[in-house]
Every structure is written in C-alpha cells, then in structure tokens.
Amino acid sequence: MKIFVVTAFPGLLSGPLAESIIRLAQESGIVQIELVDLRDFTTDKHRQVDDYPYGGGPGMILKPEPFFRAVEAIEKKGKLVNPRVLQMTPQGKRFNQGLAKEFSRLDNLIFLCGHYKGVDERVLEHLVTDELSIGDYVLTGGELAAAVIIDAVVRLLPGAIGDVDSALSDSFENNRLDCPHYTRPEEYRGMKVPEVLLSGHHARIEEWRLNKALEKTKAVRADLLNNE
Ligand code: 6GU
C-alpha cells in the first residue's frame, strides 16, 4: 500500500509514523508513507496556504489551489487513477473499525489535512471522495486524525502484526469490546490473576473471555451490541 498525506504541518505526523509497528511496516515494505508539504504547491513567495473567508467571520480558510495541485502531482507521480482522497474534518463521517478494514484493502490512500477554520468547499466537492472525522470533538487540524486512521489501517495490512490471531480478537471485532488480559506475575501485591486463566482448560477460558467481553460491552458500550 502507498499512502500520501498532504499537510501544511508534516512535523505533526512524522513522530507517530516513526515508531513501533508503523515504522516496522514501512521498513519491511508493507506500506510506503509519504508526507507531502502543502506549502510546496503554493505559487506566491510567502507560500501562503490560507486566506480570509468570503462573507466575513472569524478564522482562516485553506485555499483550494495548493490542494488541487498537490493531488494532481501525487496522481501523476504514483500513476494513480481515481484514488480515494480522504479529507480529515469534524464534519465528516465517523471513522470506525469497519472503515479501517475497507481502507486496508486498497492499494493507495491520499489524506488531506485541514487546519484553521476549514478548507475551501470546492476541495470537498470536487477533489475529496470521503470526509472523515475520528470523533465528536474538535482538533486544531486533521493531522492527528490522519495519524490515527493510518495507524488503524496499517496494523491490518498482512504481515504488519506478527500474530495474525491477535487482530482477530481486537475490540470491535464481532461488535464487542476486548476481554481483560493478564500476564506474569500470578500474584502482585495481593492482586490475583483469575483462576480460570491458569487452569489450562481452553474451553472454559474461551467461555470466560466471551462473558467478560460481553459484560464490559454491556456496561460501557451497549450500543455495539444492537449493531449486528
Ligand atoms: Cl478529522 N479533524 C479535526 N480538525 N477535528 C476533528 C477531527 C478531524 N475528528 C474529530 N475532530
């Protein structure tokens, strides 16, 4: 998979992409991630990416031209035909595990990160295929949201996580949260690991895990259970 991220603040993404599983996935060639500086697609000497809103009001709006030029350059360079172009915005559809799976099956993704008050609507209407939000709160820009989505997608790529079964037991698989987990020591400051996990009885362990997962889901995310 090849991922491009168009942003005026590439530094906001470089850290999260340079650690742990996402770093290893890039090093082993499972994914290539390219940060594209929006300012490289301006034409004025101040490299200005934003401007005042028509109609007045507070905040600055990201100009359309650098986004169109950046995406055209990416399409040409990557020989991409009709790629998915994802705009990070609090007005977007809420990102979830189902979308992470869908995106993980694509060969290319282009992320556009807004900042300030927003992006010129012509970008959304004519360039973007998917408007995405990561939750009901407002961030200063789409960069951290793009990092979240890239992380969720890349870990699903074949080979990214050593243990294939690990991803299949994640939260949100089967519309429920994950069960509790324990490791050594067996007892710590009087806190004991549940007996059943030490029993070696695989059927009973699976039953316990399922019950715990359902209990937790019912308590904090009952909405998932009615979400078949
Ligand atoms: Cl995708 N962008 C911004 N700026 N804020 C957000 C968001 C995205 N998702 C939730 N809040």
Image (cartoon, grey):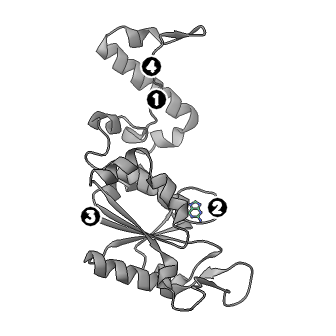
1 or 4: mark nearer the eye: 4
- Residue 29's image quarter? bottom left
| Residue 143 rendering spot, x and y as whole percentages | 53, 63
Q: Earlier in the sequence, mark 4 or mark 3?
A: 3
Q: Is residue 176 above or below residue 87?
A: above
Q: Earlier in the sequence, mark 3 or mark 1?
A: 3
Q: Report whether the residue tagged 2 is closer than 8 Å to ligand 1.
A: yes
2 or 1: mark nearer the eye: 2
For disc 2, the neighbor class at 10 Å (few under 14, some 14 to 19, many from 20) is few
For disc 3, the neighbor class at 10 Å (few under 14, some 14 to 19, many from 20) is few
**In this rendering, does residue 98 appear at all?**
no
Which residue does the image show at 46% across and 35% down from the upper left?
177
Judging by the rendered image, the residue that carries numbered circle 4 is 183
Q: Earlier in the sequence, mark 1 or mark 4?
A: 4
Amino acid type shown at disc 1: Leu
- Distance of label 4 from label 2 (alpha carbons): 37 Å
Judging by the rendered image, the residue that carries numbered circle 1 is 214
- Distance of label 2 from label 1 (alpha carbons): 31 Å
| Residue 66 rendering spot, x and y as whole percentages | 49, 84
3 or 1: mark nearer the eye: 3
